[in-house]
Image (cartoon, grey):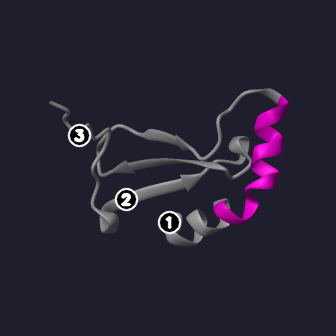
Amino acid sequence: MCEAVAAFDFRRDQLKIKWLKQFLNAGFSVSEGGSRRWLVSLVYPTGVLALVEVVDGWDIHNEWRRALHPT
Protein backbone atom coordinates (compact mmCIF):
# COMPACT_ATOMS: atom_id res chain seq x y z
CA MET A 1 0.00 0.00 0.00
CA CYS A 2 1.36 3.45 -0.95
CA GLU A 3 0.75 6.55 1.12
CA ALA A 4 1.09 10.12 -0.08
CA VAL A 5 3.78 12.13 1.70
CA ALA A 6 3.46 15.87 2.13
CA ALA A 7 6.67 17.75 2.94
CA PHE A 8 4.65 20.88 3.66
CA ASP A 9 1.03 21.84 3.27
CA PHE A 10 0.54 25.60 3.59
CA ARG A 11 -2.45 27.81 2.91
CA ARG A 12 -1.79 29.98 -0.17
CA ASP A 13 -2.97 33.15 1.53
CA GLN A 14 -0.58 32.53 4.47
CA LEU A 15 2.63 31.81 2.51
CA LYS A 16 5.85 33.74 2.90
CA ILE A 17 7.81 33.34 -0.35
CA LYS A 18 11.22 34.73 -1.17
CA TRP A 19 12.84 34.09 -4.57
CA LEU A 20 16.55 33.38 -4.11
CA LYS A 21 19.19 35.21 -6.13
CA GLN A 22 21.75 32.46 -5.37
CA PHE A 23 19.45 30.05 -7.25
CA LEU A 24 19.32 32.55 -10.14
CA ASN A 25 15.63 32.95 -9.24
CA ALA A 26 15.06 29.28 -10.11
CA GLY A 27 14.40 28.51 -6.45
CA PHE A 28 12.64 30.04 -3.47
CA SER A 29 12.15 29.73 0.26
CA VAL A 30 8.64 29.18 1.56
CA SER A 31 7.16 29.20 5.05
CA GLU A 32 3.87 29.85 6.82
CA GLY A 33 3.68 31.85 10.01
CA GLY A 34 6.20 30.48 12.52
CA SER A 35 6.83 27.24 10.62
CA ARG A 36 10.23 26.09 9.43
CA ARG A 37 11.46 27.52 6.15
CA TRP A 38 11.64 25.16 3.17
CA LEU A 39 13.89 25.65 0.15
CA VAL A 40 12.41 24.70 -3.21
CA SER A 41 14.58 24.40 -6.32
CA LEU A 42 13.12 24.28 -9.82
CA VAL A 43 16.38 22.78 -11.13
CA TYR A 44 18.64 19.95 -10.06
CA PRO A 45 21.52 21.96 -8.56
CA THR A 46 24.75 20.38 -9.84
CA GLY A 47 27.52 22.22 -11.63
CA VAL A 48 27.42 23.75 -15.09
CA LEU A 49 24.45 21.65 -16.22
CA ALA A 50 22.31 23.35 -13.58
CA LEU A 51 23.16 26.73 -15.12
CA VAL A 52 22.15 25.43 -18.56
CA GLU A 53 18.90 24.12 -17.10
CA VAL A 54 18.17 27.50 -15.46
CA VAL A 55 18.66 29.39 -18.73
CA ASP A 56 16.86 26.76 -20.82
CA GLY A 57 13.83 26.69 -18.49
CA TRP A 58 13.52 30.44 -18.00
CA ASP A 59 9.92 30.58 -19.30
CA ILE A 60 8.81 27.88 -16.85
CA HIS A 61 10.54 29.64 -13.95
CA ASN A 62 8.78 32.88 -14.86
CA GLU A 63 5.42 31.08 -14.80
CA TRP A 64 6.16 29.90 -11.26
CA ARG A 65 7.19 33.43 -10.26
CA ARG A 66 3.91 34.86 -11.60
CA ALA A 67 1.90 32.17 -9.77
CA LEU A 68 3.82 32.57 -6.48
CA HIS A 69 4.33 36.27 -5.87
CA PRO A 70 6.90 37.08 -3.17
CA THR A 71 5.41 38.03 0.17
Q: Which residue is mark 1?
A: 68
Residue sitting at x 29%, y 45%: 34
Q: Check whether the beta carbons of the residues at disc 3 and disc 2 lie within 8 A of each other.
A: no
Residue sitting at x 81%, y 52%: 55
Indicate which label's residue lies in the foreground, 2 or 1: 1
Q: Earlier in the sequence, mark 3 or mark 2?
A: 3
Q: Which residue is mark 2?
A: 15
Instruction: Name the residue type under label 3.
Output: Ala
Q: Check whether the beta carbons of the residues at disc 2 and disc 1 lie within 8 A of each other.
A: yes
Q: Earlier in the sequence, mark 2 or mark 1?
A: 2
Q: Which mark is residue 4?
A: 3
Question: Label 3: few (<14), some or many (≥20) within 10 Å?
Answer: few
SS under mark 1:
loop
- Highlighted magenta segment, given as a residue range: 48-60
Give the left or right position of residue 52, taking residue 32 as reference: right
Q: Nearer the viewer, residue 57 or 40?
A: 57
